Image (cartoon, rainbow, N blue to C red):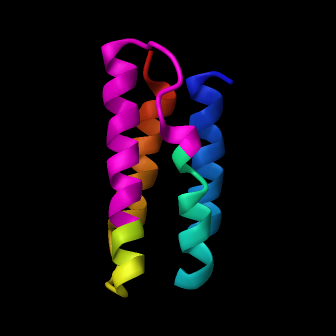
Amino acid sequence: MSDAEKATQVLDTLRAAEQVSPQAALPMLNGLVGLVQSGREASLEVEEARAGAFMAICEIGKALHRGQPTDGLWSAAIAATERWKMAR
């Protein structure tokens, strides 16, 4: 699966997880770890974009786990994942 395909799948999951309860969203986010991890060598731009998406998703997960607000975190993760999708 290409990075663009992985990023598309991550985007779909992020948008779906944003619409459900925190208890339902957390397992959805945990399921993204395998997709966001690097599976093969890629350009520095792709690696940086993927890392940014991973970190943004982790921030949402931490907030959900701690019962903290996620204001702005979803849009940041979606934007970071879109950058990953477009990276070459």
Decide if residue 66 is on the left or right side of residue 32.
Answer: left
Chief secondary structure of the magenta portion: helix
Q: From the top left corner, tell me how far across and down residue 38 is, in percent.
A: 47, 28
Quarter holding residue 60? bottom left
Q: Position of residue 51 (x, y in %)?
A: 34, 37
**Image side of residue 64 versus residue 32, left or right:** left
Position above or below: 47 against 6: above
Residue nearer the viewer, 3 or 83: 3
Residue stretch rendered in magenta on the structure: 34-60
For the image, the number of numbered tags is: 0
Placement of the C terminus among the 4 image quadrants: top left
Which residue does the image show at 56% across and 37% down from the upper left?
7
Residue 13 occupies which quadrant of the picture? bottom right
> Would you say 20 lies left or right of 71 here?
right
Which residue is located at x 63 percent, y 78 percent?
24
In magenta stretch: residue 45:
yes
Confirm whether residue 21 shows in the render: no
Q: Measuring from the top left, give residue 17's x and y in whole percent.
A: 60, 68
Residue 1 position, x and y percent, is 68, 24
Q: Residue at x 60, y 69 (%)?
A: 27
Tell me if residue 58 is in the magenta stretch.
Answer: yes
Q: Most extreme residue toward the bottom, as rendered?
A: 67
The answer, for residue 5, to whether it is visible in the render is yes
Identify the residue at image location x=65%, y=52%.
12
Q: Is residue 35 above or below residue 22?
A: above
